[in-house]
Amino acid sequence: MDEPIVIVGGGLAGYQSAKEIRRLDGQVPICLISSDGADFYSKPMLSNAFASGKTPDSLILKRASEMASEIGIEVIHERKVDAIHPESREISTGEGRMGYSKLVLALGADPIRLPVEGEMYSVNDLLDYRKFRQALAGKRRIAILGAGLIGCEFANDLLSAGFEVDVFDIASQPLGRLVPPECGEWIMKRMKGVGWHFNASVTRFEEGRVHLADGSSHAADVLLSAVGLVPRTKLALDAGLACGRGIRVNEFLQTSVGDIHAIGDCMEFEGMVLPFVMPIMHASKALASNILGKEMKLAFPPMPVVVKTPLAPTVVCPPKPGLDGAWHTEGGEEGMKSLFLGEEGKMLGFCLCGKAVSEKNALARTLG
Amino acid sequence: MKKWQCVVCGFVYEEALGMPEEGIAAGTRWEDIPEGWNCPDCGVAKSDFEMVEI
Ligand SMILES: Cc1cc2nc3c(=O)[nH]c(=O)nc-3n(C[C@H](O)[C@H](O)[C@H](O)COP(=O)(O)OP(=O)(O)OC[C@H]3O[C@@H](n4cnc5c(N)ncnc54)[C@H](O)[C@@H]3O)c2cc1C
Ligand SMILES: [Zn+2]
């Protein structure tokens, strides 16, 4: 009998790959294995769950068993894959070895943990979020480490839920890696209920206080870390797959080793890691087609990222890394429009705040 | 008029408002949005992930 297509990972990338493969081929056996419960939930909604009235349980849309029967695949949950053996086309788990015809790695990423002493939460999956919500019970002051996308989203959500929120970052503005300073400033002003602390390096969280490198300290009951992700590459590295920051794939979503593909937060493509939903939607189509033997090149259109901060609506489509150019910003209290212009005034990226977010689709089309 | 939410990213579609900038007039019912439509925020296809009524 033919071995199944094996997908490792029960997040969006794993399930979306299964769906796309099934759409093209109603018969081929597909087995999805995941170390977690493999229940299907919306990860982006973890950072606006309060605002949308969700609890960790109500974020689950479908149980693993429902997903299995709906897509027509086998789902094995709570089983970790420990090793890949490309030479025999097998993987090993605690229950022994299992063969594959094609292997898809949809392993996700781990939160980065800075060397801060004391108890610190981070939220990158539903289980993390459950623990964080429990930690919030009866608490009032939340300190957030990191003023990036996820940090700003949690700041907004917690503020709207009535918590006191302080945000700390070593950068000098919110969303420092994504938006120009003028937009950062605009966001800060709009989210004025947040205590912003920039150029601030947190060293320690102890006895209800967050301590900074400059010797100052601030009261807090819970510390949430949101300083970024590192793709899960260990399984791939151990099996000899080429990895940079993530598991490297070419435009056919192939890794450096035959019959093994990667997708989602664990993947690196053209030097970029793209830990967002939209890249998964595009990549899963190309992945499915290539796995079933029909070549299809991965080409990402412009993919604007919507920052889920209702207090300061923002959309950003950052220029590709390494492109030369500068931000040109206009606007005021109502909103900001900033274009990243390269040589000869060609637009290479944009950032829109407030009223200007309505221009998102038009600008994305111009970019594409 | 109803509100629908994308199950993947939380985007909310309000029938009463439509999405004029995407060519979907105010008052367009969810059923009447073409099957080829994608969530403007995350790209999920209408046929992939039904929006849930909120
Ligand atoms: C709070 C938050 C808000 C976000 N908001 C947005 C947003 O608004 N818009 C947007 O586009 N994106 C957003 N994102 C990013 C987006 O959610 C992710 O890019 C996407 O969900 C990643 O899916 P994935 O399947 O690659 O990874 P994951 O969902 O992390 O799935 C990885 C899976 O692999 C399994 N696994 C790992 N190792 C093994 C192993 N060895 N054996 C077996 N199984 C294994 C895990 O158990 C898990 O099921 C947000 C992320 C977070 C954390
Ligand atoms: Zn969506």
Image (cartoon, coloured by chain):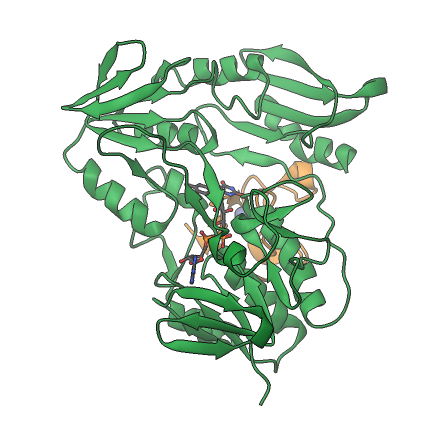
Chain colours: A green, B orange
Residue at 35% from the left image edge and 71% from the top image edge: A94
- Which quarter of the rendering shows the N terminus of chain A? bottom right
| Nearer the observer, A40 or A221 | A221
Q: Is A254 drawn above or below residue A360 in the view shown?
A: below
Residue A156 visible in image: yes
Residue found at the far right of this picture:
A344
At a point 65% along the width and 54% down the height, the residue shown is A283
Horizontal relation, residue A191 to residue A141: left or right: right
**Residue A294 spot, x, y in % from top left:** 76, 69
Q: Where is A164 relative to A29, above or below?
A: above
User: x, y (%) of residue A39?
Assistant: 38, 62
Position above or below: A34 against A367? below
Q: Is residue A70 left or right of residue A168?
A: right
Q: Nearer the viewer, residue A272 or B5?
A: A272
- Identify the residue shown where x is 58% and y is 69%: A86
Q: Quadrant of residue A110?
A: top left
Q: Quadrant of the C terminus of chain A?
A: top right
Q: Quadrant of residue A155?
A: top left
Residue B16, percent from left and from top? 54, 42
**From where the camera sits, is residue A161 visible?**
no
Q: How many marks?
A: 0
Q: Quadrant of residue A336?
A: top right
Q: From the viewer's perspective, is A181 left or right of A363?
A: left
Rendered residue at 30%/51% (across/down): A127
In the rendered image, residue A173, in percent from the top left (x then y), is placed at: 48, 16
